[in-house]
Amino acid sequence: MAFDSRMNAAPAGFDPRRDLPAGFWDFYLPLHQKFTPWRDKLVAARAARLAASQEGEYPHYLLPSEITRSEWRVNLPEWVLDQRNQMTGPVDDAELSVKMLNSGAPGVMLDLEDSMANTWGNLMEGHANAVAALYGDLSWCCKGDEALRIKPSKTVIFVRARGLHLSQAGTLPNGELTSASAFDVALLAFRAERGKLKHNLSFYIPKTESADEGKWWTALFQDIAAARGWERDYIKAMALVESFPMAYEFEEFLYHMREHILGLNLGRWDYMASLIHFNLNDPNWVLPDRNTIPHDVTFFQNLRLRIPQLCHRHGALAIGGMTALYPSRVDAELNARALKVLAEDKKNEAVCGMDGAWTGHPDQNRIALEQFPVPNQLGKWDPAYDRYPELRVPPAGVGRRTVDGSRAAARTTILYRFGVLSGKGASLINGYMEDLATDRIYRLMLAQRIRHAGRVAIEDNGKTVDHTAAFVSRLYDEELEKILAALPPDADAKTRDRYREARRRSEEMIAKCWFDPV
């Protein structure tokens, strides 16, 4: 795999034996030698599967097997039985991390992935913050104020490692890359002193695309545990169902990870992006404007029902997704609307059988908790449930496809990419928390509209507008000009140039079909 400038790279002159914790590199090299080549094969299989899907050979269920016919169970430890709300946010943000851990949420996911800009400095700060949070020592202090510290609690802490699709550059000689996933898990496990942890070291696994990838994670966890002198099943994990092919294989994935897995989470925004990506050449899958798609649209709802049914059949937790509309402490109308949407969304997930959900703002915790039975719904599943529902139900008659929606997509991708160029992996934009997943959705939606211009109606005040590449480029020009015009008069040239670069990169990613989650 060639070096990619969008990949995280250690700085020039980096020496892993000098610049990482003493002893880590000797601990890590055998893991790299085993797991990076294996990871490369899995990533190559992903690429082949995506290409096949875009040629009409879509993902499908695996054949029934002993895994699906036999009775096997995940054994959940007592400390994880209540996960009615999991707060999530970038772990390089110490202030937010402390506030999440003090929110009263039963779980907190500290993120090294999507919501954090993937740079070496952010990564190292994130790792340091994660260790401090696991020990209960993380604090944040703004100038002149008393330090904000973590309060003792039973909150379960997960760290989301980077996914298999990402590599880490700059740590090995001759430009050799290593698996970002293996690097993150190994570094955190190497630094973690078991006696200081209030529960098993626990991770969140992102971006899985096949059941076989569960074998990779299981082997990684067990090899690291052996190297640390821990029990083979000591490391625990939640995993996200956020790719279209994974939706068909997560029962088998659960089986392969049964010694480590605690539950699955429906990562709805990445799932929507993946759904578009795998169906990019099908005009029936040109999605409506993102914010006109109802939360219970059939292609989501069928999966939202399948996850708790199969998780509970095998004793694992099922966690719902993130509601993107954020509450506001300065806009009462927006705040009321955001909390109303939150309550409706989480109630729908609870009715589907989920045990909890994700939120990203402390003000959402109480409402999210109230929607789910205490402590979980593990006993809620139907032995007669058809475990093979249709997951590729086109969104016919759902939402609206408009030029205003395309404008919003162009504008949001510029603003999000500006944040990334400024070192932020997630940004609050027009009341919505936008991260890499929603940026991918918007870029893929624009790509769909370009690809199927003339075949799918996109409306503008009753007229149909063909979304040619030139038309979308014009939208980008117009939205950039609006953004620049709205800047304060004293905004410096560097800021303005960064917005221009964000606009350039966003359109380039669409033109070059760069839709992987990087």
Image (cartoon, helix red, strand yellow):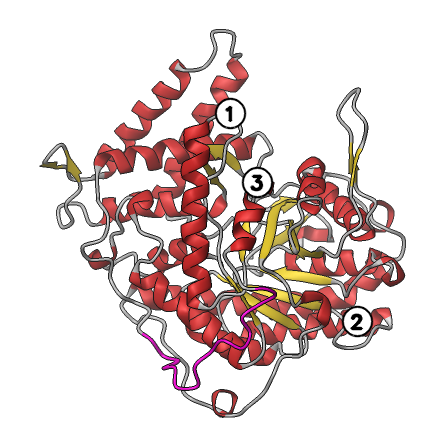
Quadrant in which residue 165 is drawn: bottom right
- Which numbered disc flags the more N-terminal residue, 2 or 3? 2
Q: Amino acid at mark 1?
A: Val
Nearer to us in this view, 316 or 240: 316
Tell me if label 2 and label 3 are in contact, CB under 8 Å.
no
Tell me the kind of residue under disc 3. Asp
Q: Residues within 10 Å of mark 3 (few under 14, many from 20)?
A: some
Q: CA distance from mark 2 to mark 1?
A: 47 Å
Q: CA distance from mark 1 to mark 3?
A: 13 Å
Q: Say whether residue 216 is left or right of residue 341.
A: right
Give the residue number, with chain letter if any, for mark 2.
Answer: 225
Residue indicated by mark 1: 330
Query: Where does the image place residue 415, in percent across and percent down from the top left?
Result: 45, 30
- The residue located at (20%, 58%) in the rendering is 284
In what element is the residue under mark 2? helix
Mark 3 — residue? 363
Q: Examine the rendering and report whether any part of residue 269 can be seen.
A: yes
Considering the numbered disc 3 on the image, is that residue within a helix, a strand or a loop? helix
x and y percentages locating residue 338 in the rendered image: 44, 39
Depth check, mark 2 against mark 1: the one in front is: 1
Residue 373 at x, y percent in the picture: 54, 64
Which mark is first along the chain, 3 or 1? 1
Residue 79 coordinates in the image, percent (x, y) = 72, 66
